[in-house]
Amino acid sequence: MRYLLDANWIAWYLRGRSEFVQAVDERRSAGLAISIVTLAELLSGVAQSTKRTESESQLREFARGVQILGIDERIARAWGEQDARLSQAGTPIGDLDLFVASTALSHGLIVCTQNRKHFERVQGLKIESVELARRK
């Protein structure tokens, strides 16, 4: 397992956005994971969907191909250390993003996200993003 997918990559993958379908599929052989926090974010989207049954089915199918990582003491410790450092620097990020980042740090994974603004603040975190073509 090498990559931890953020909710934005998965949402765009499930919507069939070609850049994200390609990016996720290219990384599958190296191993994909998501945080239980990301799963909760995605399930919130499913609950709000007008096509709830279809959305849940798509998410369930996607989740079969990835490892879901829970929160343990190691992740909690990483979260606490990063949260303290970011708060003291006056550059905090949201708790959910910090749990995703802490999961990646604890497991030595690369976060795949488009939210570089927040994730780049986390010390020692490796990030990959998709280069997006400008849409008309």
Image (cartoon, rainbow, N blue to C red):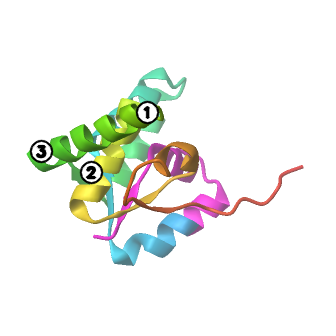
Q: CA distance from mark 3 to mark 1?
A: 22 Å
Which-is-in-front pick, marks 2 and 1? 1
Mark drawn on residue 72: 3
Residue that appears at 47% across and 37% down = 54
Between disc 2 and disc 3, whose residue precedes?
3
Q: Quadrant of the N terminus?
A: bottom left
Q: Which element carries disc 2, helix, strand or loop?
A: helix
Nearer-N-terminus badge (2/1) = 1
Check contact, mark 2 vs mark 3: CB within 8 A.
no
Residue furthest to the bottom: 29
Between 5 and 53, the residue placed more toward the observer is: 5
Boundaries of the magenta span: 1-22
- Give the amino acid at mark 3: Asp
For label 1, the SS is loop
Looking at numbered disc 2 in the image, what kind of residue is underneath it?
A: Thr
Structural crowding at the residue carrying mark 2, measured as other residues with C-alpha within 10 Å and reported as few (<14), some (14–19) or many (≥20): many
User: Considering depth in this image, is 18 or 111 the residue closer to the camera?
Assistant: 111
**In the image, what residue type sits under mark 1?**
Pro
Q: Is residue 84 visible?
A: yes
Q: CA distance from mark 2 to mark 1?
A: 17 Å
Instruction: Give the residue drawn at x 52%, y 45%.
Output: 8
Q: Which residue is mark 2?
A: 103
In percent of width and height, residue 131 lies at 68, 63
21 falls in the magenta region: yes
Residue 100 appears at what percent x and percent y? Answer: 34, 45
Question: Mark 1 sits on what residue?
Answer: 92
At 37% from the left and 78% from the top, the residue drawn is 29
Question: On residue 48, which mark appears?
Answer: none
Instruction: Give SS at disc 3.
Output: loop
Residue 87 occupies quadrant: top left
Relative side of 71 to 47, left or right: left
Q: Name the front one of labels 3 and 1.
A: 1
